[in-house]
Image: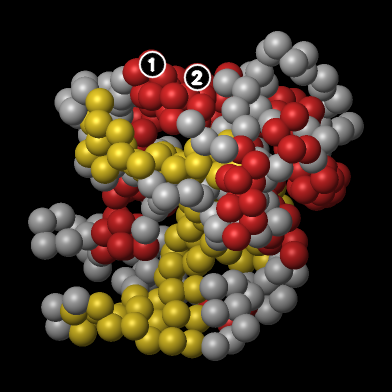
Amino acid sequence: MRLFDDIEIPKNRKPASDYELICSSKKPDTIKCRELIEHWFDRFPKDKLNEFLGRFKSKVTEHHAGALFELFVYNLCLSLGFQTTRNTIGKIPDFKIVTSTNETIFLECTISGDSISKDPVHKNSNRLHEKLNEENLKYWIKIEVEKAGPNPIPEGKLLRIIKSKVNLLDYEQELLNARKENFSEEQLISVDDWEIQVSFKAKPTEIFIESTDNIGLFIGGLMSIESPKYLAQALNEKRTRNYEVNGVPYIIALNSLEIGLTEYEFLKALIGDTKKSGFFNKNKNTSVSGVLLTKRLNLWNVREPNLTLYHNPWTKRPINENIFNLNQVKIEFTNRNYKLVRIYGDGETMIENMM
């Protein structure tokens, strides 16, 4: 059984999902990612595969991302040398791992959605992506929202202005510039109380001919940042009271889909601030040993994942950092301040004092 189907997408139709896009892509880097994920799937336990495949091939982003993340975490555990068992029964965590020193750890996977897709006022921002990617442009476009207006982003007006700016560019000159720089100088667009910076990068000819993706980068500003809110929601759904862990160390593996998530925002969800306590607290969630954070894991970046294990400073079930060859963070409190002890995969440590 194969994970990816052979899909040919007509030129007059865009892919219906990330899954369709990667199945149909002929780009060498995409093919390498596809082959790696297929290899992971070959090692994946075969119980309830139809349910897994349904989620992996889903057009719903979070369903697909959740299945991909489970596949990634399972193979990560194998690569770390752990005996790994997959569970498909409701109240037992996704995976049970047994380390080389015979320590048992439960691990549950979850997804935290991005603020843009969850915010009702700005939900049509996805339509801007869709409209831009329907255009046959010779450029990648970087969009940075400086100020969000009170109403949804005016994607029609913004698209017309972007196209007018593209028409003024000299493609051959911009292609030369793209070899020396990332994106061109930013230009400010003011429309319907929105202030948006745009810049451009010329695509090489061979990419332009086949490309259906014109978004080079899309950066924040669409709303007040609510990453900690959605991170906390995802973590709270995976508290140990919802699972049978029987006193065994327990890790929540979290893939945040938030665009541009900072460590400050994540730490706010974990340890809180002066107004609100976080998920890690000496009076709650002490049976959670830590959170393994992955940022925006998707089909195209699985070979270079961004992941860090954050240890719960108040846990009753600590885990030995030496069994994980991963970047890790231990949080240590001193009076009203705290410090981060960073433990890198190569064994190097660094202490960072925080306020």
Q: Is there a contact, CB below 8 Å, between mark 2 and mark 1? A: yes
User: Given the image, on which type of amino acid does mark 1 rest?
Assistant: Gly
Q: In the shown orientation, is residue 155 left or right of residue 271? A: right
Q: Nearer the viewer, residue 239 or 72?
A: 72
Q: CA distance from mark 2 to mark 1?
A: 8 Å
Asked if residue 129 shows in the view, the reply is no
State the residue at coordinates (44%, 24%). Answer: 164
Q: Residue 208: image x %, image y %?
A: 70, 33
| Neighbours of disc 1 within 10 Å: few (<14), some (14-19), many (20+) | few
Q: Residue 204: image x %, image y %?
A: 71, 42
Which label's residue is closer to the chain start, 2 or 1? 2
Above or below residue 113? Residue 33 is below
The C terminus lies in which quarter of the figure? bottom left
> Residue 156 — which label?
1
Q: Nearer the viewer, residue 14 or 118?
A: 14
Query: In the rendered picture of this protein, how many numbered marks are placed on residues?
Result: 2
Q: Residue 260: image x %, image y %?
A: 41, 51
Above or below residue 20? Residue 324 is below
Q: Secondary structure at mark 1?
A: helix
State the residue at coordinates (10%, 56%). Answer: 275
> Residue 131 — which label?
2
Above or below residue 351? Residue 92 is above
State the residue at coordinates (75%, 29%). Answer: 210
